[in-house]
Amino acid sequence: MKEMVVGSETARREVELPPPPPPENLVERLKDYGQEDVFVLWDELSREERDQLVRDIEGLDLPRIDRIIRCSLGSQGPPLPTFEPVPESYVSTIEERTISVRERLWKRGLKAISEGKLAVVLLSGGQGTRLGSSDPKGCFNIGLPSGKSLFQLQAERILSVQKLAAHSADGSSSVMPIHWYIMTSPFTDEATRKFFESRKYFGLDAGQVTFFQQGTLPCVSKDGRLIMETACKVAKAPDGNGGLYAALNSSKLLEDMSMRGVRYVDCYGVDNALVRVADPTFLGYFIDKGVATAAKVVRKAYPQEKVGVFVQRGRGGPLTVVEYSELDSSMASEINQSTGRLRYCWNMLAHVYSGFPKSSCTCSGERQHESSCPPFAPMPVRI
C-alpha cells in the first residue's frame, strides 16, 4: 500500500506502508500446530498472493493433518518382536490344487462376473515421474512391440474376461459388463480422462468407466513442517493408496456399487503390467473361502528385494504390510523350513474385497495411511 504525502514545498513523495498482518485467528490456529512459519514471507507478497495463501491455509484440515504427522513421526514401525510371519495356513498356492479344483474355482468366478457382481477399482493417482514422465502412469508406453499403454492392456483384459463370462453363460446377451472405477488425483484426472476419450475407452462402453479423485495432503519436512511450493502455496501430493476409502465415500461410489448389485471388488495398482484384472480363479477362490478380503502375493526372489511384505502384527494379530526398510537382515533372510524358500511374501497390490465396510471409508484417515492394506485382515493367496 502506498500513501501520497504533500510537503510544505508541495513536493510529492511516496511512502511504502507495511501490508496488514495475516488474519489473527488463522495465525493462532497455525501456532497450535507449530506451522506458523508458512507466513514467514508474508511481507514480500503482493495483495493477490497474500489472499491466495490465506485461502490455501483455510482449506487445510489442520487437526487431521497434525494427527497424521504425529502418527508418522512418532512411529518408527512396531518393535521387531511384534512382527510374525504369516501362518502358512493363511496362504494358498493355486498351482498345488488339482485341475478339477482350479476349473471349479474358475467357473465360480466367471458366474459371479456374468451376474454383474464384480467391480474393478484401479488405483491410478500417481504420475510417472520415476519413469521419466509427468503423464499419469497408465498412459506410459512400457516398450512393448505393440506400443500399448498400461491402461490399454488392462482395458483389453477386462474386455476379454467379459467375453469369457458371456461364453460361460451360454452367450447370454444379459451378461452385465464389468464396471471399472478409476481413482485419479488432481494431478492426473484431466489427462487420464482425455487419454481414455481420445482412444474411445479402448473398446469399453464409456458408461462402464467411472473416474473419481483421491484427496491430497500437504508435503512435510522430516521435522513435520509444511513445505511450501511457492511463497503463497503449500506443496501437496496425492494422499496415497490409503486415500481410496475416503475417496469412495466422498464420491458416493459405495452407493453406486450397491445400486449396481456389486458384491465383490477387485482392487489393484496401475503399474503392474502383468496384473490379471478380474481374475476369475482368484475371485472363485475368494468366494469359496468366504473371507472379507484376499490378497495375491509372491515369494520374494532374494532377501534384499525392495518390496513390502505381509506380516502378522503380533501372534494371532491382524495382517499388515511392512516395508523392506522395516525388516532387519535376519528377518529378510528367514527361510521357511517346510518349503525351503524365503518366508515372507511381497504385497503386489492385488486385492479382492467383499465390498467396502462403511466404517473403513468414513474414519478420519490416519489409520489408512499406515499402509495400503485394508483395515481388516486379508487372506493371502499365491497365484
Image (cartoon, helix red, strand yellow):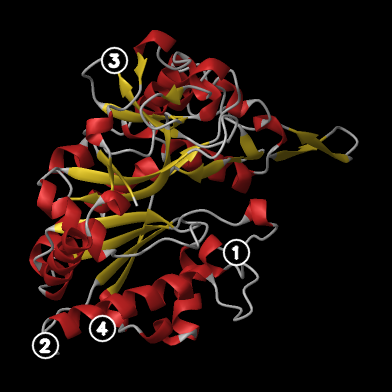
Q: Nearer the viewer, mark 4 or mark 1?
A: 4
For the N terminus, which image quadrant? top right
Q: Which residue is drawn at 50% across and 57% down?
A: 271
Residue 42, quarter of the rendered image: top right
Q: Can you identify the residue that label 2 sits on?
A: 170
Residue 355 in view, yes or no: no
Q: Residues within 10 Å of mark 1 (few under 14, many from 20)?
A: some
Pick whichever of labels 1 and 2 is earlier in the sequence. 1
Query: Relative to 78, is 171 on the left or the right?
Result: left
Q: Is mark 3 on a helix, strand or loop?
A: loop
Is the Cβ of the residue at disc 3 closer than 8 Å to that at disc 4?
Answer: no
Secondary structure of the residue carrying numbered label 2: loop
Residue at 42% from the left image edge and 83% from the top image edge: 202
**How far is disc 2 from disc 3 in space, using C-alphas?**
49 Å
Instruction: Tell which circle, 3 or 4, labels the residue nearer the N-terminal end.
Output: 4
Q: Are marks 1 and 2 in contact (CB under 8 Å)?
A: no
Q: Which residue is drawn at 44% across and 30% down?
A: 340
Q: Residue 135 carries which label?
A: 1
- Residue corresponding to mark 4: 163
Q: How far apart are marks 4 and 2 (CA)?
A: 11 Å
Q: What residue type is labelled 3?
A: Gly
Q: Closer to the observer: label 4 or label 2?
A: 2
Q: Which of marks 2 and 3 is nearer the N terminus?
A: 2
Provide residue 368's location: percent of width, then percent of height.
Answer: 33, 34
Foreground disc of the pair 1, 3: 3
Task: Determine which residue is flagged by label 3.
Answer: 314
**Considering the numbered disc 1 on the image, is that residue within a helix, a strand or a loop?**
loop
Residue 144: horizontal and vertical position, in percent? 62, 74
Marked residue nearer the N-terminal end (4 or 2): 4
